[in-house]
Image (spheres, rainbow, N blue to C red):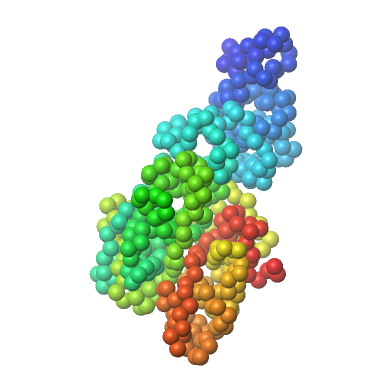
Amino acid sequence: MPRFLTHLLGAALAVGLFLRPAFAETDFLALSKDMLIGTDAVRSAAAEVIVARDNPDMIPSLVLLMRIGGSHVVTQRALKALTGQDLPDWRAAMRYQEANPQIEPHPSYYDLKLWYWGGIDRDFHALFETPIDRASMRIRFEEITWGGALFDDIPPLDTPKMIPADVADYMLDSDLVFGVEINGDVRAYPLRIMGWHEMFNEVIGGVPVALAYCTLCGAGILFETDVEGYEAPFVFGSSGLLYRSNKLMFDRQTKSLWNQFTGEPVSGPLAQSGIRLKIRPTTITTWADWRAAHPHTKVLSLDTGHIRNYDSGVVYAEYFASPDLMFPALTDETRLRQKDYVYGIRVAGGAKAWPLTAFEAEPVINDHVGLSEVVLIGDAQTRTVRAYARDGQVFSGDAINLVGPGGAWSLTEEAILGPKGERLPRMPGHVSYWFAWDGYLGAESALYGVVE
């Protein structure tokens, strides 16, 4: 007798029933596995029990089965019966799940998911306390998905080798870099290398930092990793798991999962710590422009200790060229397309995003975010945007010829400098795809060009 029928028969006999499923006694983990690996008859029988129970808490399990076992017609029909919607594949089912946060999974869901992940890499279990405490997590466990890499399989660069600009003959003028300057320490990290590693842990200008680069959401964010109250700076790696098509990083000290986009721990020992890493300014620009502005810069060496194809335009080439996402996420596309680039700033009192296309007509934008006045100097072609607190001043021109009160102002990585010694500091922000900014900030953020 199939295992599913054994469980169901035992449950029925326990309460003196035979023709109706005894839901309280039914082994729903076994039902889920039978829907995955059973014969067509067993799958159908299991689905009938799940649907007859008429409880949405089994929807997350069915969504997961769509990922593990493909869009099997029995699972599709069960999902339609419980959701009232045609969800033809896992992507559609995941978007439905994201749009319905009121649905809480059946307890068997957690065991099913850990069973699935354990079959991929048992090290995933180290990221989650068992039993799963959904209330302690800051993101929905059911929205965490496997991204295709094993735990810590995308190797971060820890204190990587840097070389002088004049010996970096592998660099093309058109190569994009993450440019960083802290306390006079000037560095360039090419995207063609960072795309393979998605993370560096480093000390720049005496400040411990980590660059978390999510290739899927187009965002490289520089975080300070020294947190008050903790003995040592946090050191990060990539977990191999995703949330809304965004990488989840983890810290090596506690193995807590962190949201790459917000710099906050979301599960594990630090989930309720209240930590939010401070964002430092970083600039995406071409190697030619960065080197011209910073001739004494150091740049990341090809000698990373890993064998990868670091040629220009290789890493994630198809994904970057496509309008589609690799993993499902809800996006408001009434204002922008999901992979349009924006530059976003988050400050106390508000957040705002500026489409990079806005800088085609206005290289200098005088604006505000929350209660802060800001001037942004940008180039859509090179994805370069820098933002500064403008303190009521109004600017025009462009990055080369910036005009403000009193005449010409000069632009640096840390501030813009006026003709009479004025100094307006840099504000932290970063570039990302619209779907990621909208998915994480949504109604909390304003959008440039839209009446607030």
In the current view of this chain or complex, which residue is farthest to the left? 167
| Quadrant placement of the N terminus | top right
Q: Is residue 385 visible?
A: no
Q: Position of residue 359 (x, y in %)?
A: 56, 75
| Quadrant placement of the C terminus | bottom right
146 to the left or right of 7: left
Answer with the quarter of the image where residue 166 lies: bottom left
Q: Position of residue 162 (x, y in %)?
A: 28, 63
Q: Give whichever of 342, 392 is nearer the camera.
A: 392
Q: Is residue 194 above or below residue 364?
A: above
At x 43%, y 60%, the residue is 222
In the current view of this chain or complex, which residue is farthest to the front? 229
Q: Is residue 15 visible?
A: yes
51 to the left or right of 118: right
In the current view of this chain or complex, which residue is farthest to the bottom? 406
Answer with the quarter of the image where residue 163 lies: bottom left
315 to the left or right of 16: left
Q: Position of residue 259 (x, y in %)?
A: 50, 50
At x 55%, y 84%, the residue is 396
Q: Is residue 193 above or below residue 59?
A: below
At x 38%, y 73%, the residue is 290
Q: Give whichever of 348, 310 is nearer the camera.
A: 348
At x 42%, y 73%, the residue is 414
How many numbered markers are drawn? 0
Q: Position of residue 101 (x, y in %)?
A: 66, 43
Q: Is residue 298 above or below residue 99?
A: below
